Structures are given as C-alpha cells and as structure tokens.
Image (spheres, rainbow, N blue to C red):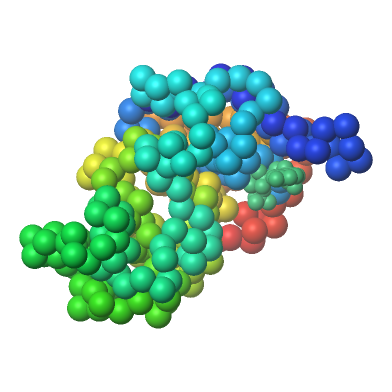
Amino acid sequence: MLILKDISKTFNPGTVNEKNALNHVSLTLKSGDFATIIGSNGAGKSTLFNAICGDFMSDTGSIQLEDMDITFMPQYKRAKYIGHLYQDPNKGSAPGMTILENLALAAGKGGWLSHISKKDKLIFKEQLKQLDLGLEDRLNQPVGLLSGGQRQALTLLMATYNPPKLLLLDEHTAALDPQTAKKVLSLTKEIVEKNHITTLMITHNMHDALSLGNRTIMMDNGKIILDIEGSQRENTTVSDLIEQFKEKSGNEFDNDRILLTK
Ligand SMILES: Nc1ncnc2c1ncn2[C@@H]1O[C@H](COP(=O)(O)OP(=O)(O)OP(=O)(O)O)[C@@H](O)[C@H]1O
C-alpha cells in the first residue's frame, strides 16, 4: 500500500545548521494498517510525514503509494490521495467560508453553493450529525467561529469525505482539551475503521500509541527503531516501550510531553 525505501533528508547541508532529519528510513504499510508513531523530540516524525506528502523531495530513496511511484510527484498532486491533519486546528479548513462551503470543497464541488444540490446538503447534514457536535444546525456559519475541537472534527470529516489512500495525522488532538481530544480520537478510530483507511498517526500519548490501531512505530534520530504489531504489541506496556527505547537508542527517553502524559 505504502512503500518507503531508503528515505533520507538532510536540512541545510554543508552549513553549521546541517541536520540529518531522516536517515535511510524504510517502511511498508499494508492496506488498512493503522500505525501510531511515537519518538523523542526532533526524532523526524513530522519530517517523515512531510516527505510522504511532498513538502520537499527526499535526498535518497523512493515512495510508492498503491500502484503509483510518487517519489517525484509534486505536493498538490499527492494531496489528491493523501489526507493530512496537523496539531493546529486552524489548518485544513477555510475560516472565512461556511461549514457548507468547506464541505463542498472537500466533496470536490469547488466550494460553490450553486454546485451543491439538495441531496448533497442532506448528505453533509447526515455526516455532520455523526460528529455529534451540533454542527448540522450551523451549516451557514463561517468555520472561523467554531471551537478548536469542532474545527478539528470538521477537518477530519473533510479530509476523509472522499476516503484518501493514506491519512497522516500529526498529533491532531494535541492542542485540544482532554475531553474534546478523546472525542476526536474516537471519531478518528470510527472513520478510519469504517472506511478501512491506511493511516499513520503521530502521538505523544504512549497509551494511545499502544491501544489505537494495529501497529506501533518508534523513531529516534531520523530512524525507525521499533515496529511492533500483533501479539508482540498486545504484550507490550508503556514501561516496556520506554525500556525498549533506552535499549535501542542507547539514550534516556527525552520527550517531556510523552513522559508527562498519563
Ligand atoms: N524545514 C526544516 N529546516 C531545517 N530543519 C528542520 C526542518 N524541518 C525539521 N527540521 C529539523 O529536523 C529535525 C526533526 O524534526 P521533526 O519536526 O521531524 O521532529 P519530530 O520528531 O516531529 O519532533 P517533535 O516531537 O519535537 O515535534 C529537528 O531537528 C528539526 O529542527
């Protein structure tokens, strides 16, 4: 489904700010895999996502998505196949446009109200209702008026309205209050499972990393140092993960946000 082979990226090469953010990363995701990613600060997690979505061209390696070689495909073309959610709920939807217009954009109707039929409107309402946030009654309000959690739930709906081949979730609940984060995570699980979307999710919550999805990947220093699934994952605890990190990286785990999360 997704095959990354030997992906490397060095920022600012040959300068004092040189940073080898990805170091020969290879990863294969099967169709429908839902893998969580954890790692130390600056491990290269977001850079890996940026390499996949085409934010920059990698220095080495290749990226295959289903039957397409997307290694040199520009970002705007990859966006047709890859959904990407960020920590910041303000990204991914247009604040000055209404909920209806945003959904029309996501549904490929160009955001034009004149292109939205009564039937489309009913479908949008039905989808919004499933979020259970009352947004179905606010179709004509600008998205900029929504709370962070409401906006992130809407962005999730928009990113998966036409299910993408790959969904990248970059700590998409980290900026939300715990209760809303829980709700958006449970929605994520529901939408991903229902549509069988191949998904990678960066999280700083080790419990979520082990309980959500079917696979857990750990990164350090631009490399994947652990990749577990099945019974091996089922038998792994949060303390095991921290131990494994020490063992594989030779360092103490240094991501405060992870260590402070219960
Ligand atoms: N565009 C860029 N230019 C220069 N350096 C960059 C760029 N993007 C990332 N880096 C550097 O690459 C390294 C990896 O960054 P990345 O954001 O991928 O880490 P991360 O694992 O997501 O970390 P965190 O959990 O702290 O968000 C860091 O040292 C970062 O400063």
- Residue, far left: 119
Percent position of residue 147, x then y: 42, 76
Question: Residue at (69%, 41%) from the top-left corner?
Answer: 43
Percent position of residue 233, x then y: 46, 34
Please state which of residues 26 and 206 is positioned toward the viewer in this rendering.
26
From the viewer's perspective, is 141 left or right of 215? Answer: left
From the viewer's perspective, is 241 left or right of 9? Answer: left
From the viewer's perspective, is 13 left or right of 54? Answer: right
| Residue 226, quarter of picture | top right
Quadrant location, the N terminus: top left
Vertical relation: 58 (above or below) 185: above
Percent position of residue 28, x then y: 47, 23
Please state which of residues 223 and 234 is positioned toward the viewer in this rendering.
223
Let me know if residue 148 appears in the view: yes
Vertical relation: 235 (above or below) 147: above
Question: Residue at (32%, 63%) from the top-left corner?
Answer: 102
From the viewer's perspective, is 178 left or right of 17? Answer: left
Let me know if residue 28 appears in the view: no
Quadrant location, the C terminus: bottom right
- Residue, far front: 114
Question: Residue at (53%, 47%) from the top-left corner?
Answer: 202
Question: Residue at (20%, 73%) from the top-left corner?
Answer: 136
Percent position of residue 81, x then y: 37, 37
